[in-house]
Amino acid sequence: MRDMIRLTDLQADDIYEIFQIADEISAGKYSGFLGRKSVVLFFPATSIRTRITFEKGIWMLGGQPILFPSDALDKKEEIKDVFGYLNNWADLLVIRHKDIRLLEEAAKYTEVPIINAMTDVNHPCEILSDLYALSKRREDFIHDKYLFCGKSGNIGLAWKEASEVLGFELSQCCGAGYEMDGVQVYHEIETAVRGKDIICTDSLSADGLKDFKNCQVTRKVMDMANKNALLNPCPPFYRGEEVSADAIESEYFAGYGFKKSLLEVQQAVMVWCLKNL
């Protein structure tokens, strides 16, 4: 049994295997793979992209999605009891919950794989999807230089996990006090962006905006990056905050179709977790 809770629990070969499965799914393989299998999902009402692609992906693979709100896991009943019973009926669990420790605790008691659909400290499926999409656009996406513009949070830390597994160069541009450990940090975007190929952003809180005034990605900033650089803002993004409107309207923006891969990659993660059980 294979869980997918942290990218750092995987090897580079595991990620490339997931990408290969995604290619095979796009080519029509694995139809019916989840036939007569039930996938239990825990998602908050606010989730849009991750939830719809998991539910659609399960249906396309022939499985049955059973959805609960994330706060169903916050009741008084102990986690070992919740998942002890779910072992009777679930074939796979997909959990979006703020506390990764809950997923790690659940994994001790489940007899089926757990997939992390986002926590407060990482978002592995999102970053795998971005990397898969980049692998289709870039000649050698592992040798590109990545810049993450945002706070130390689930998106930035997931990019860091991926860089540790795959070995690509990652740096951060942020306001003082928002730094991630273990990466090169800049506090001025015009310095940070030079020599970079892939510019990633994350949305900011209202309180954080003033601290990131020197970190906004604009069209002018993108012109300073390497030739053929890509702007990959994590949705939801907000024009005039972490990115400017002219950056989103420019040729640098990866585009809405960039996230199309989320469907195939999340299907591939489910297949990868269940293969060879």
Image (cartoon, grey):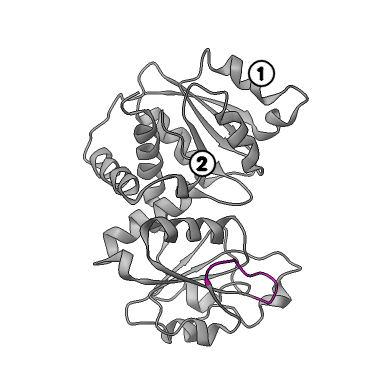
Residue 169 found in image quarter: bottom left
Tags 1 and 2 touching, CB below 8 Å: no
First in residue order: circle 1 vs circle 2:
2
Label for residue 115?
none
Q: Secondary structure at mark 2?
A: loop
Number of marks present in the image shown: 2
Q: Nearer the viewer, residue 30 or 13?
A: 13
Q: Is residue 276 above or below residue 227?
A: above
Q: Can you see residue 44?
A: no
Q: Is residue 126 above or below residue 80?
A: below
- Residue 106, horizontal then vertical, whole percent: 60, 29
What is the span of residues highlighted in magenta in the rendered image?
175-183
For the point 52% across and 80% down, the residue is 218
- Residue 15, horizontal then vertical, whole percent: 34, 48
For the point 45% across and 40% down, the residue is 53
For the point 57% across and 23% down, the residue is 109
Query: For the residues marked 1 and 2, what is the alpha-carbon distance in whole angstroms?
Result: 20 Å
> Disc 2 designates what residue?
5
Mark 2 Cα shell of 10 Å, populated few (<14), some (14-19), many (≥20): many
Indicate the quadrant containing the C terminus: top left, top right, bottom left or bottom right: top left
- Residue 57, horizontal then vertical, whole percent: 40, 35
Asked if the magenta segment contains residue 176, the reply would be yes
Q: Secondary structure at mark 1?
A: helix
> Disc 1 designates what residue?
81
Q: Is residue 262 above or below residue 85?
A: below
Asked if the magenta segment contains residue 179, the reply would be yes
Left or right: residue 174 compared with residue 275 = right
* Residue kind at label 2, given as amino acid type: Ile
* Residue kind at label 1, given as amino acid type: Asp
Indicate the quadrant containing the N terminus: top left, top right, bottom left or bottom right: top left
